[in-house]
Structure formats: structure tokens, C-alpha cells
Amino acid sequence: MTTITHHVTRDDQARNPYFYIPFDVPAGTTRIDVTLAYPKAEDCIIDLGAFDPRDTGYPTAEGFRGWSGGARDCFFIATDDATPGYVHGEIQPGTWNVILGLYKVREAGADVTVTVALDNAPRRLEPQPARTFPVRQGAGWYRGDLHCHTFHSDARGAPELLHQAARQAGLDFLAVADHNTITQRGYFHPQSSPELVFVRAMEVTTAVGHANVYGVDEWIDFRMTQPSDAHVLERLVHEKGGLLSINHDKPTIPWDYDFPAADCQEVWQSTWMAWNWVSLERYQRRLASGMRLSAIGGSDFHQPDRLLPEGPLVLARPTTVLWLPELSEDAILAAMKSGHGYITESPSGPHLEIRNGDAVMGGTARELGAVDVTVRGAAGDRLVLIDADGVVAEVEIASDDWRATIPVGDPRLFVRAEIISLRSRERLVAEFTATLDGREMPWQLKGADLAEQPIRRALSNPIYRES
């Protein structure tokens, strides 16, 4: 057993938010146990992870052995098993590093103690789980949640519980994007099925911005320290054939890096009242600048240690709905990238579809003087059509199965659609406040926000105008 103590300061944090504590591992080691101790407080939060000798520094392709952020103060890595969030397998001899994320350091600094214990008892060498490729035949609209978490990062609930929650919600696909790790796939790879397809995902998580990576087998290095590292992230993801989405660009963790060549933006995260009008305004600005960026939504649900009943603050609030030729991961990723879909408030939320002749959401139209709209489940609410300069048409939705062709004049760059609650508003506000059970509103919301902010029930992807 080895005990190592360091005094970390704000100067350390300013130089590099990642602080490395090296330790030596001899040949024949089959298990490593690490414990972290420090004076945890509101102004002192230190994350925890590990790299083996293959780490070449940012950005590395090898050497990552786990990350638990601030959710754990100890972990083990063995040849046959590991703490959730950490990678079991061969224990390479040489210099390993405990990595500390200096998220918050008090003004006086903090003493950090790391204890490392090594064991060489005989153990099996267990392989990593193989990816599966389930397919459900049949074209149609499929529903999913593209952002949620298990106890492989900072949630309390096991993958099995999240799987139950997805079935309870009636989802067709689910992307489990644990923070800075992909070890949740040990459960989700073999459990992916034609009934519920699991999409490979990981949330790149830093103190000044989060992004989801989709459709990549390998772990992606998260140790971004410069605004320009967003472009490194984009390159790493696209070289591996994946998609990059910028997450919840709003209070309390906006995107504070350069804006990269992302494929998607998470425009709606959790209940609409969680500051999503800020994300939407930033998305609108990016579209108006000429970007083509697919809108997606995800609950960011952190599965608790029990299965919750359906409600406004659980999994699939909101739900991303995609048109797929079949239900498979490849089809889901293609539809995410193209933008052929919409976001709605829940698995049973309003259906929203716009098209212009053969041009569907995410597509391009030569002439865009009118759009055909199909809405279901939003009678009495308002449909709003928007181009790069703002609102081009507003219509009250007359029935729960409503179709209309709506002139939009000479729109600039694109047309997209929103459903804004009118008749449904009182019910939606009552459902949200009921979940608070008398507690103060979260996310620093004010009563005026609840009273005055328009509540979106569904958002479409744009149809772009041919330049």
C-alpha cells in the first residue's frame, strides 16, 4: 500500500484543471485499489479517474482506465472486473496516474491524499463485451431519449433500472451518455434488441461545457483545457465516424468553447422550464448565421436507485422522434445527422411534421413559399413557423388531428416549426409545480419565468432553402 499527499491550489487549477498523481505498478499485478480523501465542501470538489502507462497526453487514443468525477472517492480496477465507470482488463506494468479533476478548489487550497493498494492474486482476464446489431424492420416514426445516465457516472441507479424506465416510457431507442466513460456498455451492448435499441454514446464533460458523442466504439479524450480544443474534439469524433452534439447550451453549464463543426445541438434538455428558451434562442442564432445543425432533445435523466412513475421530470422528457427506414443504430444516427425528425415534450407528446413537396425536415427545398404541416395531439395550441429573421406565420391548431398548408412568403435560409401551449398551458404548469411538492423552483427559476415564458410542446427540425 502506498499513500501520497499533495496540497493542490488555485494556481494548480489555473495551470491545468487536471492534476496527475503517478504511481508504479509491477508486472503480475491483477488488481489496483485507489482511495481519495480531501476536505469535500461546496467550495472544494475534486473529481477522480485513472490512466495507465499507454496514455500519451491529450488527446490520447489509449490508456484511459476510468472516470467517476465527483461521484466516488474510491475505485478498483482488476483483470476481471472494475468499479462502474472504470475499465477492467489487462493491468499494464509501468507508471499509472490517478487523475484529479480540480473542479472547485478553495482559496486556501486543499490537502489531497491518495492511497493505492496493489494485488497479484490469480484472476481471470475477462474480455470487453461485444457490440450487437439489432434491427426492427419497418419504416416509421420512432421515439427515443438521447441523453441519460447510470451509476457508471453520477447517477445512483443501475443500468438495469434505466432499462426498465425506458420500457416503461415505451421508447424504441435510448442513448446512455455517462460522463467521460463508456463502461455502461458492458450492460447495454448485450441488452440491445429490436424492441429497444441502445445507441453508443458518451458525454464529454468539463467545467465549462458538455457535449455528447454518438456512434463511436472507442472512448474519446475529454481533457479539454483550451477554447480551441473543441475543434480537436470534433476531429476525434468525426475521424471515428461519430456524431458530435453540443449539450444544454444554457444556464447553468453553457458551452464556453469555440463552436465546432458539430452535427447536432441539444436544443431541449429536461422539462421545457429548465431554461430551454435560452438553448433555443442560441440554436436559432446559429441557424440564422448559415449553420446546418440538427436539433435533438434529451432528458439528461440521472436514474435514481428506484423506478420512478411517469411524470414531467423523468426519462424521455423530452422525446426525440425520428423517421427511420428501420429501427437500427445506423438508421438512428443517420436520421440524427440529417435532422429528419422533431422533439416533443414526452413519448405521448404532440406529433409535429413539416414538409415542402419532397423536402422533409432536415432536407432542402428549391422553393419554400408554403409548408405542409401535420400536427396531432395539440388542439387549441398555437403553431408558429419561423425563418432566419423570426416568425413568418402563426396559426391556432384546430383539432387533435390537424393538417394544413401554410404560406410563409419568401423565407430566409429555412423554415422550422414550434408548437406553443395555449389551451394546454394551465395543465402543463400545474403538472410541473405538482412535481415540486412545495419545494422551491429548481435551476434558479423565478415565478415570472413560469408565468411569462412561452411553453413549447414540440419543435421541428428546419427545412432549408436551396441557396
Image: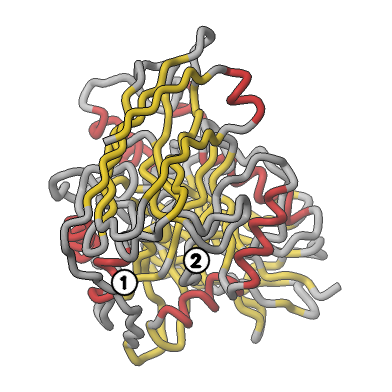
Residue visible at 34% across and 71% down in the picture: 198
Residue visible at 50% across and 28% down in the picture: 103
Where is residue 237? Give x, y as percent: 60, 65
Label count reads: 2
Q: Amino acid at mark 1?
A: Gln
Q: Mark 1 Cα within 10 Å, few/some/many (few <14, many 20+)?
A: few
Can you say whether 126 is above or below 425 in the image?
below
Instruction: State the separation of the CA atoms marked 2 and 1.
Output: 19 Å
Colour scheme shown: secondary structure
* Quadrant including the N terminus: top left
Image mark for residue 60: none
- Is there a contact, CB below 8 Å, between mark 2 and mark 1? no
* Quadrant including the C terminus: bottom right
Q: Tell me the residue that label 2 is attached to.
A: 214
Quarter of the image holding residue 327? bottom left
Where is residue 427? Give x, y as percent: 31, 41
Instruction: In this rendered view, identify the residue nearer to me: 222 or 307.
Output: 222
Q: Tell me the residue that label 1 is attached to.
A: 128
Q: Earlier in the sequence, mark 2 or mark 1?
A: 1
Which dot, 2 or 1, sits closer to the camera?
A: 1
Give the SS element for disc 1: loop
Instruction: In this rendered view, identify the residue nearer to me: 281 or 335.
Output: 335
The residue at the far front in this view is 27
Residue visible at 56% across and 70% down in the picture: 242
Q: Is residue 461 visible?
A: yes
